[in-house]
């Protein structure tokens, strides 16, 4: 799953959508003046990152079949981020 996501992001960043996202990151006003739909692409980026985070949470849940209270602790955050 990690390899598929990495390959997908690799190709996304080299597409027109990736160009728009980099333009927004570098200078939002200049990107808007060139006709880039700022709100649409920010919403797209947020939705994509939420979907990938959801997949990571699903993988963590499958890894730990039983819900445990320590999953919400700050010490577990590194594990969750590394799975993403």
Image (cartoon, helix red, strand yellow):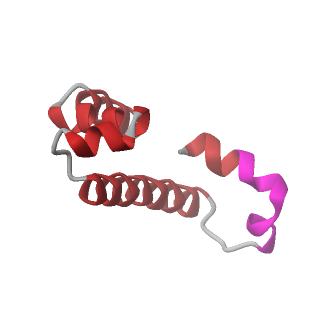
For the point 48% across and 56% down, which residue is it?
A: 53
The majority secondary structure of the magenta stretch comes to helix
User: Could you say where residue 79 lies in the image, as x and y percent from the top left?
Assistant: 69, 47
Image quarter for residue 72? bottom right
User: Could you say where residue 61 lies in the image, as x and y percent from the top left?
Assistant: 56, 64
Q: In the rendered structure, which segment of residues is drawn in magenta?
A: 69-78
Regarding residue 16, the answer to whether it shows in the image is: yes
User: Could you say where residue 49 lies in the image, as x and y percent from the top left?
Assistant: 42, 53
Relative vertical location of residue 67 with respect to residue 43 in this rendering, above or below: below
Relative vertical location of residue 69 with respect to residue 54 in this rendering, above or below: below
Q: Nearer the viewer, residue 55 or 32?
A: 32
Q: Look at the image and tell me in which quarter the N terminus lies.
A: top left
For the point 16% across and 33% down, which residue is it?
A: 16
Q: Is residue 66 left or right of residue 30?
A: right
Q: Is residue 54 left or right of residue 37?
A: right
Image quarter for residue 2? top left
Residue 49 painted magenta: no
Q: Is residue 84 left or right of residue 13?
A: right
For the point 35% across and 54% down, which residue is it?
A: 42
Q: Is residue 67 left or right of residue 33?
A: right
User: Could you say where residue 48 lies in the image, as x and y percent from the top left?
Assistant: 35, 54
For the point 74% across and 72% down, which residue is it?
A: 68
Image quarter for residue 19? top left
Q: Nearer the viewer, residue 46 or 53?
A: 46
């Amino acid at each position: 799953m990690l390899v598929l996501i990495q390959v997908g992001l690799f190709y996304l960043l080299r597409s027109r959508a990736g160009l728009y996202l980099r333009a927004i990151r570098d200078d939002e006003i200049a990107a808007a003046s060139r006709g880039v739909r700022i709100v649409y692409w920010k919403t797209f980026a947020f939705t994509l990152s939420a979907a990938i985070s959801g997949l990571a949470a699903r993988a963590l849940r499958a890894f730990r079949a039983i819900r445990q209270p320590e999953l919400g602790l700050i010490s577990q955050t590194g594990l969750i981020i590394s799975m993403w």
